[in-house]
Image (tube, rainbow, N blue to C red):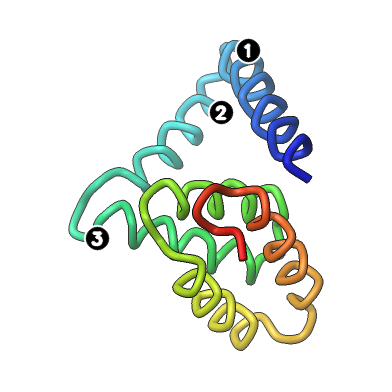
Amino acid sequence: MADRLDDFQKFRADLNEEILGCGHLGIKRFFALDHQAYEPGPLPVKTKELLGLTASMVLRCDDCITYHLVRCGEVGWTRDEIIDALNVALIVGGSITIPHVRRAFARMRDIPGLQP
């Protein structure tokens, strides 16, 4: 699955560049707002990434889950801490999130520091 993580990251970067290059002001503003939401503030970046992961699980967005899992690994969350957050998402989101929890566990196999 590691190649797929590399593919995901390349696809995301390439398409974000194309989208931001299209010149649409509303799209640029939304992307900027999204970026700014994860900047340091009263909540540290580390906390914001775990919140992003949990919200992505409840909303069932696999691309967002992958992005936030990678970022959670980068900012220093441990596998056990992430699993605990996934439990909260499962409780909030209900059984419909179980397939996303499975995919999150599979994706963690490819992220440095989050492997079993």
Packing grade of label 3 (10 A; few <14, some 14-19, many >=20) is few
Q: Position of residue 88 (x, y in %)?
A: 54, 82
**11 left or right, relative to 99:** left
Tell which tag, 2 or 3, sits nearer the viewer.
Answer: 3
Instruction: Judge whether 47 appears above or below 26 on screen.
Output: below
Q: Residue at x 25, y 56 (%)?
A: 44
Tell me which amino acid carries mark 2.
Ile
In the depicted view, which residue is nearer to us: 36 or 69? 69
Whether residues under marks 2 and 1 lie with C-beta atoms below 8 angstroms apart, the answer is yes
Packing grade of label 1 (10 A; few <14, some 14-19, many >=20) is few
The image quadrant of residue 23 is: top right
Tell me which amino acid carries mark 1.
Cys
The image quadrant of residue 19 is: top right
The residue under label 1 is: 22
Distance from the alpha carbon under mark 3 to that under mark 1: 33 Å
Q: Secondary structure at mark 2?
A: helix
Tell me which amino acid carries mark 3.
Leu
The residue under label 3 is: 43
